[in-house]
Each structure stands twice: as structure tokens, then as C-alpha cells.
Amino acid sequence: MAETTHFGERTVPLDEKQALVDKVFHDVADRYDLMNDLMSGGVHRLWKDAMVARLAPPKTGSVPYRVLDMAGGTGDIAERILNASVGYAEVTVSDINADMLRVGAERAKDWRFGMQAKFVEANAEELPFEDEYFDAYTIAFGIRNVPRIERALSEAFRVLKRGGRFLVLEFSAVDIPGFDRLYKEWSDRAIPPIGRVVTGDAQPYQYLVESIRKFPPPAKFSGMIEKAGFKRVTHTAMSGNIAALHAAWKL
């Protein structure tokens, strides 16, 4: 019997999920960051700033500081890292979706340190990079869309150098009484209709809402990170646990 997984609330064959996810992001690529602003009231920008602050990329050194920003197609994390390092970092923006990468590569032409970024189409489960090549691996709001999360974590561990930093920013489960109900109402009643107005299609955002609820809670996901070989695994709740920042080291 074929192995299955979830695509939002639907159960689908595991081998079909990636194509379904690809279509979601193909459909929304050009309005992706605008929708993030509308859905979060701009708060996602603060979460991403906090992620890059936790990374604290160095501003000098004898060799470039290599970062892999996975599922980073539109480049908003990469630009932050480059600015924080004053151009010392080299960021490889990798995404399985060519449309998201197209948006990011076009934007990078206007970045202060855009020459320090490159855009590579790749699957998080099978990275086309050497062992122990990167100093840091970041992924923001992308890991829950990977069909085989354990494989993606294993690949992240493989491509990181010893002493490498691993950071995941992902949606979580609101745990403040009262606020959890309001957040659910907002997610169910507002986000898909906003998506329809902005992108012409509510379905991709219905999937995104459902995918958040299917993602493992922070403690369970931290256990998955540890199982992949990472050490000093922590998670920090953000904005009432709407999102969580997971951090670890390859030691």
C-alpha cells in the first residue's frame, strides 16, 4: 500500500505532495510577501529580524561565511543576512519552486549586497551541495511544506560544517487562552478570503492554514531535530506561540 501524508486536511500519496505544494507556491509567488504582510499584520518581519539576530552572522573574517537559506525563494531572509553581515556573508537561496526563485533573483538586483547571493533550485530532501560546506542553514516557514521532514533535517545536518548553526522559523500552535480562539477565527474566516482578493484564489491559503495545524508542536519538532544529530536544541515562542524559532548546532 502506498505511503500517505497530509496536504492540509487531505490525505494524499506521499509522492504526490511535492507537486501539490509546488502548485500552491507557483500560484502565489508574485504576491507571496504581500500576503505575508496582510496575514500577519507585518509581524512576520519582526520574527524574521529575530531569526537573523539569533544567527548573528559575522562581519569580517579570512573566508566568507556561507549560509544556505532553504525555501527562501523571494529572498527576504537572504537580504537580511547580507545586510547584517555588511556583505561578508555569502547566501545561497535555495527553493524547489522556480517561480519563487525568479521573484527573489529579480529583487536581488536592487539589494545593497545582491552580488553575494545566488539562487539555486533544489529539493530540501536531496541537496546538491557538498558535505560540510555551509556555516549556517536557515529555513523560514518552509519546513512544514516538505513531504519528508526527517530527510530534510538529515540533509541540513550533512551540508553543515562542524560548529554550524541551524535555525528554523515556523508557525506553531497558539497557547494563550482566548487568543487561541481569536487566532483560529482569523485563520479560518479571514486568510482564505484575503488570498482570493490579492491573488485571485483562496485555495492556496486554505492549504497554508491547514498545514500549520498539521505541523508538529515545538517540543515534538525539537525531538526530530535532535534525532537528526543536532545538539543544544532550543525553541523560543513568538507572539503567543503563533510562531516558534528553533535553534541548534552541529557539534
Image (cartoon, rainbow, N blue to C red):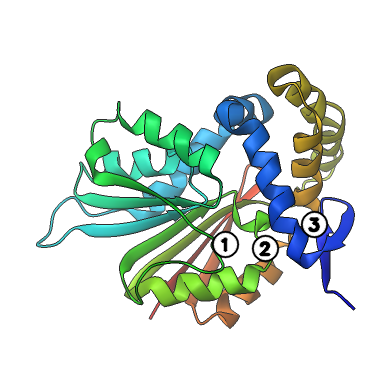
> Upstream in the sequence, badge 3 or badge 1?
3
As drawn, the label of residue 235 is 1
> Upstream in the sequence, badge 1 or badge 2?
2
Looking at the image, do the residues carrying marks 3 and 2 touch, with CB atoms under 8 Å apart?
no
Inter-mark Cα distance, 3 to 2? 12 Å
* Screen quadrant of the N terminus: bottom right
Looking at the image, do the residues carrying marks 1 and 2 touch, with CB atoms under 8 Å apart?
yes
Camera-nearest residue between 170 and 124: 124
Q: What residue type is labelled 1?
A: His
Camera-nearest residue between 36 and 7: 7
Q: What residue type is labelled 3?
A: Lys
Q: Where is residue 247 in the image (x, y as percent from the top left)?
A: 49, 63
Q: Mark 2 points at which residue?
A: 218
Instruction: Give above or below for 59 relative to 185.
Output: below
Crowding at dot 3, Cα within 10 Å, few <14 / some 14-19 / many 20+, comes out as some
Nearer the observer, disc 3 or disc 1?
Answer: 3
Residue 49 appearing in the image? no
Residue 193 appearing in the image? yes
